[in-house]
Structures are given as structure tokens and as C-alpha cells.
Image: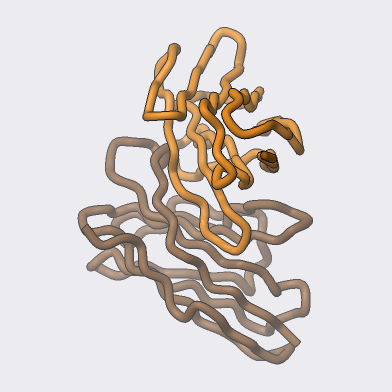
Chain colours: A brown, B orange
Amino acid sequence: KAGVTQTPRYLIKTRGQQVTLSCSPISGHRSVSWYQQTPGQGLQFLFEYFSETQRNKGNFPGRFSGRQFSNSRSEMNVSTLELGDSALYLCASSPVGTANLKAFFGQGTRLTVV
Amino acid sequence: GQSLEQPSEVTAVEGAIVQINCTYQTSGFYGLSWYQQHDGGAPTFLSYNALDGLEETGRFSSFLSRSDSYGYLLLQELQMKDSASYFCAAPNQAGTALIFGKGTTLSVSS
């Protein structure tokens, strides 16, 4: 089975721009979660989608948004980028019935805002 | 709120056994899971415990005691490649978000 795929792997953007990151979950997984990882803050939960519905959102400003498509693929968008948004953005998919205990991560998108 | 506490660093030598502890405070509890992350890489799922007791997966084992709000990851026959960060994590009350501890950096020396 193919793993979680995230694209692109690396991005460099300028302050004020917007960015869209993509995630394809493991086949059959309907839950997709997004995390931001920075050296100082660790792994911070952004949001979780299940069957195209956002079930939970972390403590991030409204500039961070996401969506999930009918094939479970997900995208997240960050608008009006700030320097502090530089981070590794990770997507994880989980099988049904595990309460997200078993999360399988993609390789991440490393975003640098300059 | 929900929080998970784990030591920030652990050091050990090749061939040794190391235990990484995790204590948690949650409202509602589904279980505890463990992840390994090498520098520059993504977290990799290692093990999870939904019930009390020990789960063994090769050289790695994970233990959970819900009455003590405590769990640990046990790594045996340590190898240099085990040098990485290890995270414990638990779902939120609704089971719709995985909350992570801040991670334990394991350094294995020869």
C-alpha cells in the first residue's frame, strides 16, 4: 500500500503571499490531519477532516484553512504568509475506528517564508 | 485541557535498554501512541496501547497504565540508528485530534 504523499516537499514564499499544500492519504483512510512542526513549539495540531468535514481545528488564526475532497485527498491553505509560518507541515492519515491513535505521516512540506 | 509530559533528553549506549516515560492529563481517554522521528524526517508510527498492559513489536515495547495516567516506550538492544526523537501522543476527548508531547531526544553512543 502506498504511504501518505505530500506535495510539494519544499517551498519558499515571500511574506504576504499565500500557499496551498496537498496531501494524499493511505488508500482507505478517511481521516486526514494536519500538523505544524517548529523547533520551539513541537508538533501542533492544525485541523482534522473526516469524510470531507472538518471535525476539529487547533488554535491557529483564520489564515490557516483546509478542505478534504470526496477521494479523501486534502489541501491546506495559508494566506497572507508571515515569517513565523516557516515550518514543517505534516499531514497524517488514520484508519477508521482508531480515534486517530494510529497516524501515518507523509514526508512533510518544508515551508520557508522570506 | 490536555497535556503529555515526557523527558526532553535521554542518553544510552549501544546494546542497552532505555525507557521513555510519558504522563498525561486528558479528559476522556482512548489510549497512547508512540512515534519516532529522525532529524529531517517525518514521524513514524511505532506502537499504541488502547488498553492497559504491554504491547511488544520487535525491539520496541509500549506499556500503558490508565489508573496511573502513565505509559512508557521501552527500546531494547539499542542501536546507533535508534538515535532520534520519540513522541508520545493521545487523542483529544472527541478522538478527532492527536495531541503530542514535546518529544524526547534519544542519543545512543558506542
* Nearest the eye: B81 or B105: B81
Which quarter of the image is occupied by the N terminus of chain A?
bottom left
Q: Is residue B67 above or below residue A49?
A: above
Residue at image coords 58%, 25%: B27
Residue at image coords 56%, 66%: A89
* Nearest the eye: B104 or A96: B104
- Residue A9 location, x and y as percent? 50, 77
- Residue B54 location, x and y as percent? 43, 15
The answer to whether A55 appears left or right of A90 in the picture is left
Q: Which of the 4 image quadrants contains residue B24? A: top right
Q: Is residue A26 above or below residue B58?
A: below
* Nearest the eye: B63 or A25: B63
- Residue B16 location, x and y as percent? 61, 25
Residue at image coords 34%, 54%: A50
- Residue B3 location, x and y as percent? 68, 33
Number of callouts: 0
Which quarter of the image is occupied by the C terminus of chain A?
bottom right
Judged from this view, the residue extending furthest toward the top is: B67
Q: Which of the 4 image quadrants contains residue A41? A: bottom right
Q: Is residue A62 above or below residue B84?
A: below
Residue at image coords 56%, 84%: A19
